[in-house]
Image (cartoon, rainbow, N blue to C red):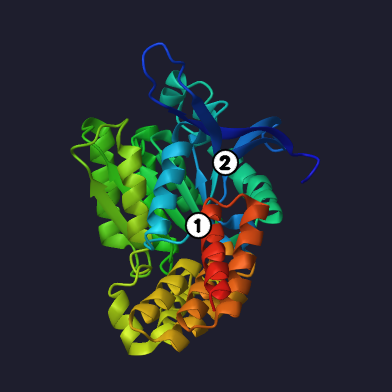
Amino acid sequence: MSSKLEVLACLVLWSAIALAAPPGVAAQIVSEPIVIGEAFNLHSEILGEDRAVLIHRPIGYDQSEQVYPVLYLLDGDGHFHHTTGIIDFLSRDGQIPQMLVVALPNTDRTRDLTPKTSTDTANNFPTAGGADRFLAFLTEELAPFVDSHYRTAPFRVLVGHSFGGLFAVHALLAQPESFNAYVAISPSLWWNGGSPVAAAKSFFANHSNSDRFLFLSMGNEGGAMLSKAWEFAAVLEENAPEMFDWEFALMDEETHGSIPHRSTYRALERLYRDWQIADFEQLAQQGGLDAFDAHYAASSQRFGYPIITPENIVNRLGYWHLGQEQVDQAISVFKRNVAVYPESANVYDSLGDGYDAAGQLELARQNYAMAVKLAEATSHPALEVYRSNLARIKAKIGTK
């Protein structure tokens, strides 16, 4: 890591299980940390201060060499936990890719997240107006640091709520190339007399080929919050080019405080609406692994970087072949996963299942053993499953 980086702490949730015991007998408590991220300080020359940064790495990050799109999250101290949960849940279900999350806790929130303003607004928010400098910090200092220390794909998503949503809109209109996708949750578009609405008209007049993504949401807030959001959506309806992908979601059942979770979930679903395979079995029957590769090649074209068929999808296809008693095809598919993800314990365990089904027990034993070896080195949560498979195949070989 750079000398700028000072590791502060791991963010952990403590999982404790208290075992029920009869009256008078002390309960045994077994606990261990569940780590969801890491925290460090990064010094900013642009802002003239140290900034805390929270990072969430996808499950299996250390066991792969793949690159990941990056979600930059404003108000990071308040939204880190639920946002990383959304991403892990949706990616496990195959609806979105795995992503790195880079979250930024606040120092002076009003200063950083608001654009320059008129005198009237400035009287109510004396430190306001630093959005351009904060955007420079994100694009010139933070993002290059993240790209140099983590395996990132050239696709960035910015998520902000309230003033953070205002900042996301401002970043889009001021420097659209800064991020590929923008999520503005209940943005304060009333800022400076509603100037973001006028700025949007000017933006589209000068960016007729913009291919950015914008998700805009609003809760049951009324007043200038809602009216300016509607005005902004009208500008999008009338002026956004065909390549500009956008959605305005009115969530009447959500308050200003509750709306971030559902908005982030829905925005990611919208952004990656073609990511998930609609009919897995049909695609498997039609073209096997080649058909799945073609599906993700299309995603590569859309998102602008090479995307290979994910490990879990290939694994699922291998087991589909086993279910069809197509053992040779299953082994071939599992071998592909081993070639692409050689540091993953799970791919060797699956290949072991394929060889076991084929009656090639020694090859099964070798792959189960590799799964155990890798799992032991990384404290893999499925280690005991892999050990069980290895013990089972050894016993099976011993009876032959």
Q: Secondary structure at mark 2?
A: strand
Percent x, y of residue 7: 71, 35
Q: Which residue is mark 1?
A: 385
Q: Quadrant of residue 370?
A: bottom right
Nearer to me, 63 or 152 = 63
Q: Residue furthest left?
A: 252
Q: Quadrant of the C terminus?
A: bottom right
Nearer to me, 138 or 320 = 320
Identify the amino acid type marked 2.
Answer: Gly
Which label belongs to residue 178? none
Point 49% across, 59% down: residue: 180
Q: Is 389 left or right of 6, judged from the image as shown?
A: left
Q: Which residue is mark 2?
A: 37
Between circles 2 and 1, the one closer to the viewer is: 1
Q: CA distance from mark 2 to mark 1?
A: 26 Å
Q: Secondary structure at mark 1?
A: helix
Q: Quadrant of residue 349?
A: bottom right
Q: Compared to 97, does 220 lie above or below?
A: above
Q: Residues within 10 Å of mark 2 (few under 14, many from 20)?
A: many
Q: Compared to 333, does 207 lie above or below?
A: above
